[in-house]
Amino acid sequence: MRTLFCGITASLLLASAIGAQNLLTNPSFEEPDVAPGTAQIFAGNIAGWTDSSSCGIEVQDNCCGSPSDGSQHVELDSDCSSTISQTVSTTPGAKYVLTFDFSPRPGVVDNRLVVRWNGVQIFDELAAGAPPPADTDWNAHAIGVTATGTTSTVEFEDGSFSSPGVGTYIDHLPEPGRSTALLAGLAMIVGLATQHRKSHAGGAPR
């Protein structure tokens, strides 16, 4: 989410600071806690994230593929193609980098993730999941953005052409040290994932 789900995680970091901090809340979707091996769709908002589509936010814990980071991720195609968003404090004119991990759901062909920064589309990718028993195939992305005000909003949307209620995973906000090392020279970082990750566990899609 429907994590996104594309699986995503995100963070906002000050690259030039010694000990950068992630400004996003709940970047790896570890809240609320979901029982291992299950998924749950939460009506309304969860910690840090707003349900912008009224489809609910689906959080999974190793039920239908392995997460990129921690034990949970989001599937953006919940009961319908969903959009989740978070607004953070920013400095006008400051440059940031948004990073995130995206994986297709195993066995699902139509996994399309759309990302917007302050309403402007900055990412659009379609990916197909390998058939079971293949696991998730996480890929990290990093995109430079600029703040235009004292607050900025990032949105993750399942843009699938059909809405079967499955597909599009998002996950993983890297720790500040790794993000800073990867993107040194940029003023700030919003980080979801900084390196290509493939999970190899054998979780079967539901």
Image: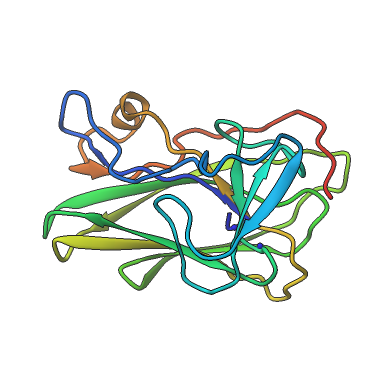
Query: 79 or 113, which is in the foreground?
Result: 79
Question: What is the tally of numbered marks visible in this picture?
Answer: 0
The residue at the point 25 percent across, 61 percent down is 152
Asked whether, in this view, residue 39 is left or right of residue 134, the answer is: left
The residue at the point 35 percent across, 73 percent down is 119
- x, y percent for residue 170: 56, 49
Q: How is the image coloured?
A: rainbow
Query: 165 or 43, which is in the foreground?
Result: 43
108 over 9 or under it: above or below: below
The residue at the point 73 percent across, 75 percent down is 162
Asked whether, in this view, residue 78 is left or right of residue 190, the answer is: right
172 over 50 or under it: above or below: above
- x, y percent for residue 66: 70, 36
Which quarter of the picture shows residue 120?
Answer: bottom left
- x, y percent for residue 122: 40, 64
Q: Is the N terminus in the top left, top right, bottom left or bottom right quadrant?
A: bottom right
78 over 189 or under it: above or below: below
Which quarter of the picture shows residue 179?
Answer: top left
The residue at the point 19 percent across, 51 percent down is 95
Asked whether, in this view, residue 115 is left or right of residue 143, the answer is: right
Query: 205 or 54, which is in the foreground?
Result: 54
- x, y percent for residue 204: 85, 41
Which quarter of the picture shows residue 12?
Answer: top left
